[in-house]
Amino acid sequence: MIEDSMAYPEQRPIQGKKGSSSKKFRYIIFLILNIVGIVSLVSCSWRNRDASGSPPTIYTIPASSIFNDRAVLNGTVNPNGLAVNAWFEYGTDPALSTWIATTRQEKKSVTTPLPFRASINGLNSYTTYYYRAAASNRFGTQRGDIRTFLTGEYYVAVGDSITRAGGKRGYAPTLSDLLKNSKGYPNTVANLGNDGATSAEGAKLINFMLSTLPKAKYYLVMYGTNDARLPVPVPSGKGLRPGEPGYNGSYKDNLQKILSAILAAGKIPCIAKVPHTAWWNIDLLSIQDYNVVIDELVVANNIAVTPPDFYTYFQKHPDELADGLHPNKIGYESMANLWFQALTR
């Protein structure tokens, strides 16, 4: 028995070591489950936060600072507490199925409406433009209502010092205001009058003027005072046709060259009667013949606008001439009104 006892010692389980490993294993499992639970809670928290967000709220506001070739687009965006990008889409398609987008503007993550704007350039005159405000965040893109605006019309006044007004206001600004107030959109009247210009010089300059202001559509033409200067006024060409003796170099020839250039450029010419003057070195008989020629040219060129009669007006209102030739402030306002009546009749 003793041998057996020594040969085969009692096999007893090691209780302490096994219990310790089991506790460690349970503790590790506990930690893993807790970590997974925390991660799950954080994930659910973010998902709940994401679920509560929404796209920005966007409104299109009327455009401002509208000119013949540019405008300012306006809008309002509420980011709804999230960072957003805001921009405008514009074009000539009423549905804006195709559009040009302005540069995107980053807005802060606030919960109050924020105004924003964008200047657009290179627009075409006499055109209806459509536009809308747009904004996006991580929940999507929202677009505002489509609004419209009209770019204005562009007129160019060509003539001599009576048109130019010697650096004074002239009739152009007043006419511009009258047209704008009447039509409800911008109307620009540019002044390209030249001191001492004759009809022949106007014929030489007209192509340059057309290239200088290519977006202009209407040309308001008035030459003749300097053509009538004594001692040798320019022949009127009254009643003559191209090729007939006395036509070449006449007032009629020069004015027809101006009208032909304007029409060839796709523009619309309008002619005014040469004004009455009290200056001794201006031949009134020649001016009267020039005004007959103007009536002939209106018919020959199918000009729809009836020429404003500055001859009759200033003959009846000499008090509106500052020096017997150039209008004073009231005289230029009267010229603007006569042009306005002719252009809108």
Image: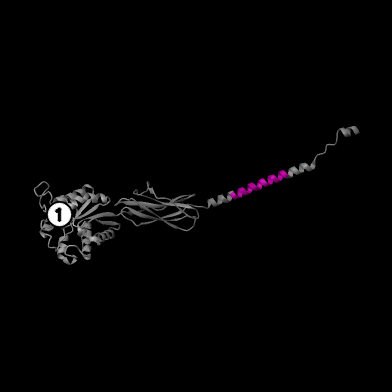
Residue found farthest to the right: 1
Residue found farthest to the left: 245
**Residue at the (56%, 50%) spot, across then down:** 46
Q: How is the image coloured?
A: one colour
Left or right of residue 73: residue 53: right
Identify the image quadrant of residue 193.
bottom left
Q: Nearer the viewer, residue 180 or 70?
A: 70
Is-magenta flag for residue 32? yes
- Residue 223 placed where, x, y %? 17, 56
Amino acid type at circle 1 is Ile
- Number of dots carrying numbers: 1
- Residue 315 placed where, x, y %? 14, 64
Left or right of residue 158: residue 185: right
Identify the image quadrant of residue 15.
top right
Quadrant (top left, top right, bottom left, bottom right) of the C terminus? bottom left
Which region shows up in magenta?
24-42
What residue is pinned by disc 1? 294
- Residue 148 placed where, x, y %? 35, 53
- Residue 244 placed where, x, y %? 9, 47
Would you say the magenta stretch is mainly helix, strand or loop?
helix
